Image (tube, rainbow, N blue to C red):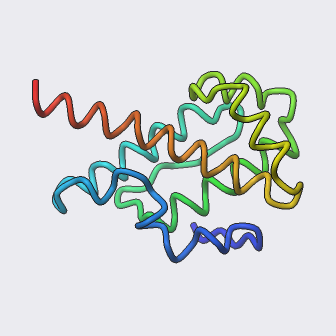
C-alpha cells in the first residue's frame, strides 16, 4: 500500500532513522521488529482501520500508514482520540503541551511521531526482555 500524503514527506524516506529502536536490533531481528510494530499499531489505533498487516513491512510503509491513520483519527474519529492515546500510553499533559506548541498543520505529524516512539518502545522492550529471560 503506497500512501501519498503531503504532510508525511518529512518522515517518508528517512524512516530507518525515524523508527526508534530499529537500529538497536541485529539485522536479522529488524524484520520481526517491524512486523510486531505494525501489529501493535493496528491493534492500538482502533477505531481507525489499519487494514491487513504485511508479511514484510518496511519502515517507509509503516510511517506512511501511521500518518494516514492519525489523519483519519483526527478527521473522522476525533471523539476517540483521547481513548486511543490513553491505550497507547501517551501522557495527556505531554500531548497538550506538544499540541499547544505546534502549528495546526504540523499536529498530525507530531502526534504520529509520538505514537511511533511509544509503540516502538513497547515492541522493543518486549523483544529485548523475552530474549533475555
Residue pictured at 59% horizontal, 42% vertical: 115
The image quadrant where one finds the C terminus is top left
Front residue of 77 and 103: 103
Residue 23 location, quadrant: bottom left
Residue 92: quadrant of the picture: top right
Residue at horizontal 20 percent and vertical 29 percent from the top: 129
Tell me: 87 left or right of 109. Answer: left
Residue 44 percent across, percent down from the top left: 57, 31
**Image quadrant containing the N terminus:** bottom right
Question: Looking at the image, is 126 positioned above or below residue 112?
Answer: above
Between residue 85 and residue 41, name the one nearer to us: 85
Q: Quadrant of residue 68?
A: bottom right
- Residue 91 placement (x, y as % from top left): 64, 26
In this rendering, the answer to whether 91 lies above or below 36 is above
Depicted 129 relative to depicted 27: above or below:
above
Q: Residue at x 60, y 71 (%)?
A: 2
Question: How many labels were placed on the picture?
Answer: 0
Q: From the viewer's perspective, is residue 111 above or below residue 61?
A: above
Residue 29 placement (x, y as % from top left) = 20, 53
Q: Report whether 57 appears left or right of 108.
A: left
Would residue 43 be found to the left or right of residue 36 on screen?
right
Place of residue 79 in the rendered image (x, y in percent of width and height, measured from the top left) = 86, 27
Q: Nearer the viewer, residue 57 or 90?
A: 90
The residue depicted at 36 percent of the width and 56 percent of the height is 55
Amino acid at each position: 500500500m503506497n500512501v501519498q500524503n503531503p504532510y508525511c514527506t518529512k518522515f517518508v524516506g528517512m524512516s530507518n532513522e525515524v523508527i526508534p529502536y530499529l537500529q538497536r536490533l541485529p539485522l536479522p531481528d529488524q524484520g520481526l521488529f517491524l512486523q510486531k510494530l505494525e501489529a501493535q499499531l493496528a491493534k492500538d489505533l482502533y477505531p481507525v482501520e489499519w487494514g491487513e498487516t504485511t508479511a514484510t513491512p518496511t519502515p517507509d510503509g509503516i510511517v506512511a500508514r501511521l500518518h494516514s491513520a492519525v489523519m483519519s483519527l483526527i478527521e473522522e474519529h476525533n471523539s476517540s482520540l483521547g481513548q486511543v492515546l490513553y491505550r497507547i500510553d501517551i501522557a495527556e499533559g505531554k500531548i497538550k503541551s506538544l499540541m499547544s506548541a505546534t502549528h495546526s498543520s504540523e499536529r498530525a505529524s507530531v502526534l504520529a511521531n509520538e505514537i511511533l516512539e511509544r509503540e516502538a518502545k513497547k515492541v522493543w522492550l518486549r523483544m529485548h526482555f523475552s530474549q533475555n529471560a
